[in-house]
Image (cartoon, helix red, strand yellow):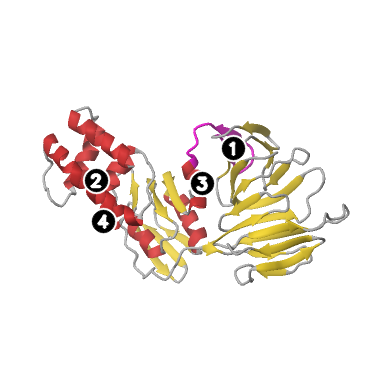
């Protein structure tokens, strides 16, 4: 962030800004407490030291990453005042929650495990240590809260059965499968998998969002099946966002190679690429310009937005804070850029959000967003 903002200020000082860039810098500068009028270029240069000092003080409560220069320049003052930022591409009116939101806390490490025999284990309450033994495969909850499968005996080939781990809204969890594959589940996600993989493949079923680090096994391809597609790998790192209330299914590859197959076609992904499948499953496309930081932000405990609309943002907030969102009136079509730590309570989130012509009311766990 600092690098991009400094670059923009340097362009302003040297007189190389476009009219749009100049307007952004001068709009930002007018908000500084020590100056009311737009200054000369030389005065802006003299003030840069104070800007960076104040920015550094704000970093104690914020981990920032680079965003587009428009977002940086428009939001730098907001960083000073609240230690966080979240901005629109245009001017926005501040949003204030009408009802106290402090008690709506962020999600955490929560999940429910359903065993093959129907036994349900609430992993929030389960003690560390062994939870079950399924045909020589021990399931245990580790001290770090992860779910682990440990093979004590090679199960008989005739042994079959599936386990299901499900995170609620407001929950995440990590599970280490019997083959050594690691899976991180985002909120409101379900993963179904056999507790003993077959000899010729490793097939799991996903609804929601998960990040996979697949253990290599050339004899048994790893397949992730969602409602609309199947992803096949041998050993790799990738993220699948397949929530049923989203308009697209996104598969993002970080390492290795995967093949994404649908009834309408298939695509091979290389690191840094992403497949996009529309809601009807009729169109599969390739995105070669992926913002990996944004796609993996949830795993790093951050909300990251880049040109996202209000409804898209609120779907993420709904899942993480376990709240329902309803809309009244004409809702803004503004696009938003920025980041918010996912460990903020909901009151802090709505102090950061500056949404155009939008008001919010909270009744229990129902948020009503009203457009003007």
Viewer-proximal residue, 200 or 240? 200
Could you tell me which secondary element the residue under label 2 belongs to?
A: helix
Alpha carbons under labels 3 and 1: distance apart = 13 Å
Q: Which mark is residue 81?
A: 4
Which stretch is magenta?
Answer: 273-292
- Mark nearest the camera among 4 and 2 is 2
Could you tell me which secondary element the residue under label 3 belongs to?
A: loop
Tell me whether circle 3 and circle 1 mark residues in contact (CB < 8 Å): no
Viewer-proximal residue, 303 or 308? 303
Alpha carbons under labels 1 and 2: distance apart = 36 Å
Residue 229 in the figure: left or right of residue 97: right
Tell me whether circle 1 and circle 2 mark residues in contact (CB < 8 Å): no
Q: In which quadrant of the rendered view does residue 42 lie?
A: top left
Tell me whether circle 4 and circle 1 mark residues in contact (CB < 8 Å): no
* Residue 7 rendering spot, x and y as whole percentages: 28, 34
Q: Residues within 10 Å of mark 1 (few under 14, many from 20)?
A: some
Q: Which numbered disc flags the more N-terminal residue, 4 or 1? A: 4
* Residue 37 rendering spot, x and y as whole percentages: 11, 44
* Residue 150 rendering spot, x and y as whole percentages: 73, 57
Residue marked by disc 3: 296
Residue marked by disc 1: 255
Q: Which numbered disc flags the more N-terminal residue, 1 or 2? A: 2
Q: Is residue 354 above or below residue 215?
A: below
Alpha carbons under labels 3 and 2: distance apart = 28 Å
């Amino acid at each position: 962030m600092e690098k991009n903002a400094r670059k923009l200020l340097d362009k302003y000082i040297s007189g190389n800004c476009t009219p749009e860039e100049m307007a952004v810098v001068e709009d930002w500068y007018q908000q500084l407490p020590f100056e009311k009028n737009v200054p000369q270029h030389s005065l802006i240069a003299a003030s840069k030291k104070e800007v960076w000092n104040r920015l550094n003080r704000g970093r104690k409560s914020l981990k920032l990453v680079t965003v587009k220069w428009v977002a940086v320049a428009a939001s730098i003052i907001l960083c000073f005042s609240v230690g966080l930022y979240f901005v629109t591409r245009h001017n926005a009116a501040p949003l204030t929650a009408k009802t106290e939101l402090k008690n709506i806390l962020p999600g955490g490490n929560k999940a429910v495990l359903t065993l093959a025999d129907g036994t349900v284990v609430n992993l929030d309450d389960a003690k560390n240590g062994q939870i079950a033994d399924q045909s020589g495969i021990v399931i245990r909850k580790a001290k770090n809260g992860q779910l682990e499968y440990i093979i004590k005996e090679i199960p008989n080939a005739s042994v079959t059965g599936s386990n299901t781990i499900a995170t609620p809204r407001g929950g995440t969890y990590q599970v280490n499968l019997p083959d050594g594959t690691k899976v991180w589940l985002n909120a409101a996600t379900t993963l179904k998998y056999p507790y003993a993989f077959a000899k010729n493949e490793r097939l799991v079923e996903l609804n929601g969002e998960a990040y996979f680090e697949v253990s290599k096994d050339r004899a048994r391809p790893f397949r992730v099946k969602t409602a609309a597609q199947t992803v096949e790998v041998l050993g790799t790192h990738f993220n699948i966002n397949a929530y049923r209330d989203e308009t697209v299914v996104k598969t993002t590859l970080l390492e290795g190679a995967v093949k994404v197959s649908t009834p309408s076609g298939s695509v091979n992904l290389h690191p840094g690429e992403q497949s996009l499948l529309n809601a009807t499953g009729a169109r599969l496309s390739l995105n070669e310009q992926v913002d990996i930081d944004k796609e993996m932000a949830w795993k790093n405990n951050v909300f990251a937005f880049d040109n996202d609309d209000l409804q898209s943002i609120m779907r993420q907030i709904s899942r993480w804070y376990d709240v329902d969102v309803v809309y009244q009136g004409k809702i803004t079509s503004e696009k938003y850029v920025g980041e918010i730590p996912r460990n903020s309570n909901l009151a802090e989130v709505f102090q950061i959000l500056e949404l155009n012509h939008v008001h919010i009311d909270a009744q229990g766990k129902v948020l009503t967003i009203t457009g003007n």
